[in-house]
Amino acid sequence: MLKILKYLKKKEWMYAAFCVFFIVIQVWLDLKLPDYMSEITTLVETAGSAMSDILSAGRGMIACAIGSMAASIVTGFFAAKTAAGLSRTLRELVYNKTLDFSMQEVHKFSADSLINRTTNDVTQIQTLVSMGLQAIIKAPILAVWAIVKIAGKSWQWTLATAIAVIILIIVLAITLVIAVPRFQKVQKLNDRLNTVTREQVSGIRVVRAYNAEQYQENKFDEQNEIITDNNTIANRVMALMSPTMTLLNSGLTLAVYWIGAYLIVAASAMNKLAIFSDMVVFSNYAMQIIMAFMLLNMIFILLPRAQVSADRIVEVLNTPVSIKDGEQTAASEESGTIEFKDVSFRYPEAGGNVLEHLSFKVNKGETCALIGATGSGKTTAVNLIPRFYDVSDGEVLVDGINVKEYKQKDLRNKIGYCSQKAKLFSGTVKSNILFGENDKPAGTDEDVKNAMSISKADEFVEKMHDGTDSAIAQNGTNVSGGQKQRISIARAVARKPEIFIFDDSFSALDYKTDREVRRQLSEKTADATKIIVAQRISTIRDADQILVLEHGKIVGKGEHDELMKNCKVYQEIALSQLSKEELEDA
Ligand SMILES: Nc1ncnc2c1ncn2[C@@H]1O[C@H](COP(=O)(O)OP(=O)(O)OP(=O)(O)O)[C@@H](O)[C@H]1O
């Protein structure tokens, strides 16, 4: 938890200092109250006391109460500001770190866990700091000050208070031992519950189509039950705390008065009044001590949860980013070339190599296609170009420079990337097409129009109610799969990149549109180098270079006609899609 405090800014430390100051005032005023009570008791019991003296003490009490309330409000204000400031910093840091993470780190933590850490865990810290600043500081000050005040009054009363405090500590310890591990467990289980819920919601169509509601519900119930069981046990134990405290408080007051009664009876007539007034004051201070422990108890409930959250946040912040920026900016002598030099790749924590000894070069303006069976490594290979992963062996060069040497931003600015699963963001058609353009000079409406015309997205966007300002739902759920692909191709085109990467980005287009989009791309973006991953021979047969992948190795390289003659794997793929006549006619 202390590690988290280093993220407090100077301003927030100052707010925290204000909190301490106002808490000291508050405690002083709270502990001043019993003094006035004692004065009033003495005045009432003393014959001939003036009414004005009693009223003056009463006014003192009211002033203390109002002052304490005001100090408490100001403390709350500064505590909230400190906590909110810290949580803003943490959210920002965790979010920014997540953005810097490579796919490797994202997989390690899981997307759900990263979301939980940015939201739920930060909230736990915020709650602790806000409550803690008030309670953690107030409790010891209150306890110590109250103990100092009652010290030396009567050993019998002190003994009664000590016994009450010992019982309190034992009860606190038992509760914490039972409750804390359960609260800690619940936080980890929340990640799993989120995963199940997200899977259920995002896969709702498949779940319904397979009548798998019950199956999914059972999965959810299983996680939900574990969380509920843990929460129930922890909260049941915690529920015992409040009545125990009340009982102790009342018991202690009773004990103080009982002992007081004996002391008064045993005292000489002159001392009786003083002991009576001491008794009233003592019982008040004793209650304040119990109050201090009650406050500490609150912290003990919040602290373990916040501790788990703090560890989870620090784990993200301290995880080194595996893909580090180089120094190279965009400028280089070559332009639009891609070269793989004996590249091998293994996914972290996976058994063997997924890619083995890939070597090929694509020159400026050329089109290179990758084809092969599912799982042969096509996506993995193209993901090495924008450095979503780093090679395990060998080198990937863009414009003659190893991709590791580039500043990632500059490298990615050269690339127009279309992922295998077209990904759209909530916003409008236009905001999706000009996505991420703040790195580059802002795209114009003309750019959007041009990109849509190349990707054939204009055909359906023009028919939409608000044209390019039409809304796109999260994940593009309000457009079809093919429309999503066309918008995502337009997004890549609008970037005016040196290099295009189309990872199976034409798969949902009908053959006619597929052909038309490729024709437009080769005419209007002739200078750009293109890497196309595809399953359809028709999509890639015109490519300058076709790489045939099998089990992560290149088993064929060349143009369509060459491969039809000398690559068995390619022939099999081609013949499985087109008849011999179609292939010969083409
Ligand atoms: N994140 C990952 N962690 C571990 N292994 C992975 C990961 N992603 C892919 N793989 C494995 O790497 C191999 C190549 O996967 P890749 O996605 O590159 O194949 P592909 O040729 O693009 O397949 P498809 O045509 O189905 O898209 C597969 O065996 C796959 O199981």
Image (cartoon, rainbow, N blue to C red):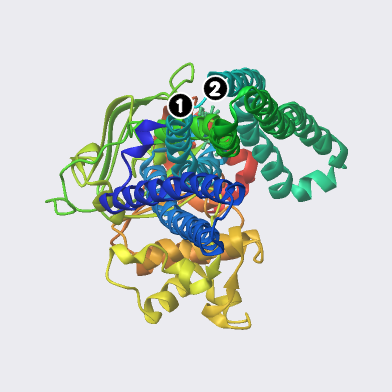
Q: Is residue 143 above or below residue 426?
A: above
Marks 1 & 2, CB-CB < 8 Å contact? yes
Q: Nearer the viewer, residue 121 or 373?
A: 121
Tell me the element at label 1. Answer: loop
Can residue 529 be seen in this snapshot? yes
The image quarter containing residue 305 is top right
Distance between the Cα atoms at labels 1 and 2?
Answer: 7 Å
Which residue is identified by label 2?
158
In terms of secondary structure, where does tag 2 sit?
helix
Rate crowding at label 1 as few (under 14), some (14 to 19) or many (20 or more) other CA atoms within 10 Å.
few
- Left/right placement of residue 268 relative to residue 101 reads right
What's under tag 2, amino acid-wise? Thr
User: Mark 2 or mark 1, which is nearer the start of the sequence?
Assistant: 1
Depth order, front residue of 154/254: 154
Which of the labelled discs sits on residue 510, or is there none?
A: none
Q: Which residue corresponds to mark 1?
A: 151
Q: Position of residue 450 (x, y in %)?
A: 41, 76
Within 10 Å of the Cα at label 2, are there few (<14), some (14-19), or many (20+) other Cα atoms? some
Residue 432 relative to residue 408: left or right: right
**Image x and y of residue 35, in percent:** 49, 45
Please tell me which residue is depicted at 74% across the width and 44% down the height of the picture. Answer: 200
Position of 448 compared to 363: left or right? right
Residue at 36% across, 69% down = 524
- Which residue appears at 84% of the width and 39% of the height? 212
Can I make out residue 510 in this image? no
The amino acid type, in three-letter code, at marker 1 is Ala
Name the spot of residue 273 as percent of width and height, x first: 58, 37
**Dot 1 beta carbon under 8 Å from ligand 1:** no
